[in-house]
Image: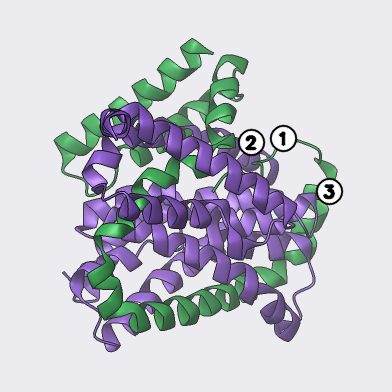
Chain colours: A purple, B green
Amino acid sequence: MEFWTFFAAKPLMWLIVTIATFIVTSWLNRRLGGTPLLHPVLVSLFLIIVFLLLTGTSYETYFEGAQFIHFLLGPATVALAVPLFDHFERVKKLLLPLLLACMAGAVTAAASALLVAQALDASLGTLLSIAPKSVTSAIAIGVAEKLGGYPSLASGLVLITGALGCILAPPIYHILNVTDEAVKGFTLGVSAHGMGTAFAFEYGLMAGAFGGLAMGMTGAFTAFMLPLLVPLLGIG
Amino acid sequence: MLIGFLILLLFQFAGELIVVFSGLPVPGPVVGMVLLLMGLIIKGEVPEYLRIPSEALLKHLALLFVPAGVGLMTHFGLLKQDWLAILVALIVSTALTIVVTALILNPSAKKLHRLSRVKHGQDTLGEDSH
């Protein structure tokens, strides 16, 4: 028991647990055909939380180690500019319809989620955490914090939204008779961020590229749009 | 590689500074990302020393969400109280977003297809990034 007490108090322990769990769940997800329902982040969260609860470890203790990973979110968010630039170069002649679709999609995502949750009596913290649910966690975590929501709740809701987008998109495309790969990919990127983008690659490379473009555009636009939209809807 | 990483940190720092001094309610790294995008557009290309660390970080982006996500364990009370509102809101809003985006973009489908088929094969965001 002495070893456990010593090791569990060290930041190193939680760094190892986080990376090892993620490697195992990523491997498992690949073996299961990459299903969005068992996304490696979702499964990692579940396993680590269970482990922390079983060992009576507080989130603060865990975060002392995990913060070293968390810190890299900042530079990684800045790095999103690189693929965004690559995609921009490719489609700059068609920027107008793409921007329009991205902006309309982003406003629809945030406004409809806020209005439905508000109508069902969700608390203020939940509302402010649900607002950025359609954008990549890299951006949603920071946005939720700025709005006064809970970054960790936001990152969980982002993952659930990603899985939902991958499940809902194919039947909706069928009903609306959407057949073009580029439209399918871009729509997945707007509504379901990186998880939608990964799913879009199954339609083809072009769908995946448009998904990546949509994810970056929607993330940046949403970060600037939400601080205006939230008070407009009378929340906060 | 090291220079590229330093550039990412400096752009993040610039973003944080702008946020602090302007009072803009936007995360510093997002402002840094917009600044870097403008810089790349002016430069016209992504230098190799910046591309390597950027793609290395983005390849493992999903891992970086885990520490914040584990914080869900501090919100069990909130989840218990609001789970139905959350679930309905997420389903309705995700479906609506897909419908609105697809309907706006569908008329441009042919043009998008033609344009992007010409320039294919460039590196794209891998499936590990979210």
Q: Is residue B58 above or below residue B118?
A: above
Residue A225, position in %: x, y?
34, 59
Q: CA distance from mark 1 to mark 2?
A: 8 Å
Give, as a three-letter code, the residue at label 3.
Arg
Kindly identify which residue carries mark 1.
B123
Residue B108, position in %: x, y?
71, 66
Query: Under tag 1, what secondary structure?
Result: loop
Q: Is residue A13 above or below residue A215?
A: above
Question: To which quarter of the image does residue A17 belong?
Answer: top left
Query: Under tag 2, what secondary structure?
Result: helix
Crowding at dot 3, Cα within 10 Å, few <14 / some 14-19 / many 20+, comes out as few
Task: Tell me, for residue A86, which label it has, or none.
Answer: 2
Residue at x 23%, y 60% (from the top left corner): A149
Pointer 2 chain: A
Kindly identify which residue carries mark 3.
B117
Give, as a three-letter code, the residue at label 2.
Asp
- Which quadrant of the figure contains the N terminus of chain B? top right
Depth check, mark 1 against mark 3: the one in front is 1
Question: To which quarter of the image does residue A96 belong?
Answer: bottom right
Please indicate whether residue B59 sits to the left or right of residue B121 in the image: left
Residue A199, position in %: x, y?
68, 59
Res. A48 visible in picture: yes
Count all numbered tags in the image, as a single digit.
3
Residue at x 78%, y 66% (from the top left corner): A180
Residue at x 34%, y 82% (from the top left corner): B85
